[in-house]
Image (cartoon, rainbow, N blue to C red):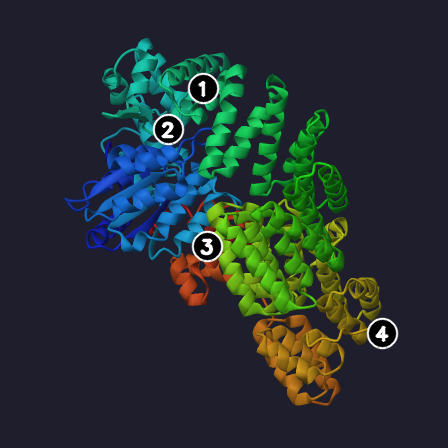
């Protein structure tokens, strides 16, 4: 049965065609995915005989290290592609790595680049791949990414890359299915084994089948795959068993030089282990036949044996001057605390330099477990570095904890300058964690400390930080005063980073009074930040502009800024900003009444970062209120709690408006007054016209005379009773739900019918119901019935859009074909499919279809293996 590749013809044909197109100058991406042992690597091996004669295949591996090595798979490729890539890897710059690889692939020779096990990739690798994806269509190359479905959760770093792949020209998605029972019978032909027993034990997984068959004795098979692997291992001489166990503690492929240092004999002496199907020995590397084989061997070892073998691996790697990431992995596995404290900070700094912020945060955290082993000054540096990396990836509470510990150590030293800087960072991290009052106290202390230092640049930073918090609290006059003082000090000190930060705050503070002046300062802040490569503050300025534009319902302009900041934050891996930007994107989609798009973006904002989470929850609740699709109470309750905790009108106002809308649709006007009055008063006091106008509208609908700002904001026009002008304004701004709601305020039957048509088209059921009642009360006899009621709520918790997508998946359509059918972006369909798999707890698309059917019809018989046999393996 060795070498058999069954039920994979379609997938192999797709790979071969992609290689052929690459030879003609058209590049593409192949996403090869499925569960562990399903045969992804076997397909890649089979491809070698199918590519054009002049083509080459380059393979890089992602490691199963506890913390992946930055740019690991590209280091594997460096040997085959020469000096430019090696130089870029030595510098650790992911952009240079992507550029070097692009230059290599731009040559005329067609190339298949395979990156194995991308689910284990570090962030720097994912980012370099993202840059390559954007250019692949113009290259004579195929980029094949293999990964396991069951390793990809909703917040897995690979998810974003898979979304980007959808926009990279031609994309092939190959979902590798399990083998059918007839295929298993074919594999077992000439054997005494029972195909039904083997199929039952393995569920059609090719690797499991091959292990059981190879380890069978006569007509009996081992009870488990682990038993099968260990049975093969125990048939080797003791010397070779020891060698295989030693190699098993080393994740992924193993350099032959390392093999020789570890075993004291050449890799070629491992022939017997190779013949037993445990290893694959090549001229440069030794690999286990499958990662599952390696794990089975490691998991079966006693703990003391694992520790000893990792200790030997550590010594060998130290002798070969291996990367700090590899060294710290084995140091931790061996319990070598001294080596952990020595190598973890180095690994963290390497990861940080490569832009692998998740890995950097993990390695700094590993250092902190032994903090007392470092000198005091290094303790502070490690704590602050960990805090910054956690802030970058959006782990705000972890950032706060580490920064607080650093501040306490700073207090014990006489260096007031460093203390002031530490306090300023603590203030920023506290705000990101939603702890506003603590953030303001830290900011005030930072200013007090730095005022005595007599360094204008540092004082500018402290004052600008206070200005930022004042802006966020809508204390705009105070913010403008602090920001102008910070600008003067930053200019005096020549500190362009502080200048950009302060301009950012001044522009945001002035926006309400003069959008033109505010935008001018914000644009200058972006230019200054980009001139010194300060991506963080450039992102912050873009976010501030976008937020203000959405408040003003300038949706097209806001989208332009959002697209710019998304690209910038993705390149820099600023996950905190990415999550927040998704929340603003959700606000835009909600305003445009694109419910599914709004929900998709809002769910991406539901992270452990209160400012972003509050926005996402508010949008989700509003979409539910407007469509009547589900009870929004859970989302509204949590959003309200977060908004009050942050004590910012920009959070409190939208939650109050959503509450008012929910109550208004139930004709509960007393509740509207309760929700709107205090927040309306606060919006008046702070001078926030958009929130004041929206709540004034709801109060006036509830019969309360409320102050309306002197503004042409459509909500202000609507609050003043001019529903026709408001409807026209909303329509011009591309906000159809708001347009219909304004039309619904009038008593003109023709305009009410127009509103009803819009609402029915949008699926805005609750307000459409109210409009129908109003039409009947006005004596209109022919009120359109509207669309048929939606089917009862899906028992699997799938939204209407997700049910629609799943139906097309069941029909065999790819994500790109579904996107074209539903007029959506492929990325949106990707997210729907990911969420469907999560809700159904399904490892792949086929299982999702089957589980949805089982949930919808619990009395039905599940498809038997024979029934499944007729299905195409690639769907």
Instruction: Answer left or right for 89 relative to 705.
Output: left
Which one is closest to the eye, mark 2 or mark 1? 2
Q: Is mark 2 on a helix, strand or loop?
A: loop
Q: Which residue is label 1 attached to?
A: 300
Q: Can residue 298 be seen in this view?
A: yes
Give the spatial CA distance, label 3 vs label 1: 38 Å
575 on left or right of 28: right
State the separation of the CA atoms marked 4 and 2: 69 Å
Residue at the (61%, 32%) spot, across then down: 384
- How far apart in space, not on screen, are marks 3 and 2 (Cα)? 29 Å
Instruction: Quickly name the residue at label 2.
Output: 252
SS class of the residue under badge 3? helix
Most foreground residue, 676 or 401? 401
Please name which of the two marks, 4 or 3, marks the residue nearer to the observer.
4
Q: Mark 3 points at which residue?
A: 830
Query: For mark 4, what is the residue?
Result: 704
Task: Report the mark closest to the observer, 1 or 4.
Answer: 4
Give the camera-side residue of 232 and 598. Answer: 598
Q: Position of residue 808 (x, y in %)?
A: 43, 61
In the depicted structure, whether residue 324 falls above or below residue 708: above
Q: What element carries label 1?
A: helix
| Lower sequence index among marks 3 and 2 | 2
- Give the CA separation, mark 2 to mark 1: 18 Å
Q: What crowding class fits label 1: few (fewer than 14 Cα within 10 Å), some (14-19), or many (20 or more)?
A: few
Q: Choose the circle earlier in sequence order: 1 or 4.
A: 1
């Amino acid at each position: 049965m060795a070498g058999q590749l069954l039920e994979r013809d379609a997938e192999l044909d797709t790979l071969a065609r992609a290689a052929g197109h690459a030879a003609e100058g058209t590049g593409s991406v192949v996403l090869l995915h499925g569960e562990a042992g399903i045969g992804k690597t076997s397909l890649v091996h089979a491809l070698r005989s199918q590519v054009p004669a002049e083509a080459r295949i380059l393979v890089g591996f992602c490691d199963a290290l506890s913390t992946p090595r930055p740019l690991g798979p590209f280091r594997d490729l460096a040997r085959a592609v020469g000096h430019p890539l090696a130089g870029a890897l030595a510098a650790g710059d992911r952009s240079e790595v992507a550029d070097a690889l692009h230059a290599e692939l731009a040559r005329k020779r067609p190339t298949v680049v395979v990156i194995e096990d991308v689910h284990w990739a570090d962030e720097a690798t994912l980012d370099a791949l993202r840059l390559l994806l954007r250019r692949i269509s113009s290259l004579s190359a195929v980029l094949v990414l293999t990964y396991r479905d069951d390793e990809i959760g909703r917040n897995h770093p690979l998810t974003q890359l898979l979304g980007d792949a959808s926009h990279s020209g031609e994309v092939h998605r190959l979902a590798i299915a399990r083998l059918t029972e007839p295929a298993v019978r074919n594999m077992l032909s000439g054997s005494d084994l029972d195909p039904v027993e083997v199929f039952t034990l393995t569920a059609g997984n090719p690797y499991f089948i091959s292990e059981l068959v190879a380890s069978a004795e006569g007509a009996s098979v081992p009870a488990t795959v682990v038993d099968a692997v260990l049975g093969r291992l125990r048939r080797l001489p003791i010397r070779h068993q020891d060698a295989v166990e030693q190699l098993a503690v080393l994740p992924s492929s193993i350099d032959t030089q390392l093999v020789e240092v570890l075993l004291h004999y050449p890799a070629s002496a491992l022939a017997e282990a190779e013949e037993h199907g445990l290893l694959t020995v090549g001229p440069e590397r030794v690999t286990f036949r499958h990662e599952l084989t390696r794990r089975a061997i490691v998991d079966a070892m006693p703990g003391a044996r694992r520790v000893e073998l990792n200790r030997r691996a550590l010594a060998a790697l130290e002798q070969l001057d291996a990367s700090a990431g590899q060294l710290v992995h084995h140091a931790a596995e061996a319990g070598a605390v001294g080596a952990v404290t020595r190598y973890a900070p180095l690994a963290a700094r390497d990861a940080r330099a490569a832009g692998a912020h998740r890995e950097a945060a993990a390695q700094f955290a590993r250092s902190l477990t032994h903090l007392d082993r470092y000198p005091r000054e290094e303790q502070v540096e490690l704590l602050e570095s960990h805090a910054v990396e956690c802030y970058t990836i959006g782990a705000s509470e972890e950032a706060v904890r580490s920064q607080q510990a650093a501040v306490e150590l700073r207090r014990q030293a006489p260096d007031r300058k460093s203390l002031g800087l530490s306090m300023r960072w603590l203030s920023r991290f506290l705000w990101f964690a939603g702890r506003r009052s603590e953030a303001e106290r830290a900011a005030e202390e930072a200013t007090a400390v730095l005022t005595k230092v007599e360094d204008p640049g540092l004082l500018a930073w402290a004052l600008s930080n206070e200005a930022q918090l004042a802006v966020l609290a809508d204390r705009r006059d105070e913010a403008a005063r602090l920001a102008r003082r910070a600008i003067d000090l930053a200019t005096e000190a020549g500190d362009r980073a502080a200048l950009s930060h302060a301009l950012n705050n001044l522009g945001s503070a002035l926006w309400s009074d003069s959008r033109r002046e505010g935008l001018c300062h914000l644009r200058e802040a972006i230019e200054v930040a980009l001139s010194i490569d300060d991506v963080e503050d450039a992102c912050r300025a873009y976010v501030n502009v976008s937020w203000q534009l959405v408040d003003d319902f300038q949706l097209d302009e806001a989208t332009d800024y959002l697209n710019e900041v998304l690209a910038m934050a993705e390149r820099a891996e600023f996950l905190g900003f990415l999550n927040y930007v998704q929340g603003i994107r959700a606000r835009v989609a909600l305003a445009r009444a694109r419910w599914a798009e709004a929900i998709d973006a809002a769910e991406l904002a539901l992270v452990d970062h209160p400012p972003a989470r509050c926005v996402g929850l508010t949008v989700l609740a509003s979409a539910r209120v407007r469509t009547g699709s589900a009870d929004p109470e859970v989302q509204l309750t949590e959003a309200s709690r977060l908004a009050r905790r942050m004590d910012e009108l920009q959070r409190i106002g939208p939650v109050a408006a959503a509450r008012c809308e929910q109550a208004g649709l139930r004709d509960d006007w007393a509740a509207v007054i309760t929700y709107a009055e205090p927040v309306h008063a606060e919006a008046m006091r702070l001078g926030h016209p958009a929130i004041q106008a929206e709540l004034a509208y709801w109060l006036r609908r509830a019969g309360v005379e409320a102050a309306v700002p002197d503004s042409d904001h459509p909500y202000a026009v609507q609050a003043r009773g001019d529903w026709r002008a408001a409807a026209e304004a909303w329509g011009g701004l591309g906000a159809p739900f708001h347009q219909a709601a304004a039309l619904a305020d009038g008593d003109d039957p023709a305009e009410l019918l127009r509103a009803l048509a819009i609402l029915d088209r949008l699926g805005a059921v609750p307000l459409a119901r109210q409009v129908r009642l109003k039409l009947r009360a006005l004596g209109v006899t022919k009120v359109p019935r509207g669309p048929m009621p939606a089917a009862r709520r899906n028992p699997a918790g799938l939204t209407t859009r997700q049910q629609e997508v799943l139906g097309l998946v069941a029909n065999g359509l790819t994500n790109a074909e579904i996107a074209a059918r539903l007029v959506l972006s492929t990325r949106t369909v990707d997210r729907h499919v990911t969420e469907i798999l999560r809700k159904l707890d399904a490892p792949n698309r086929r299982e999702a279809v089957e589980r949805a059917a089982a949930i919808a019809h619990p009395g039905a018989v599940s498809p038997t293996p024979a029934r499944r046999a007729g299905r195409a393996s690639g769907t």
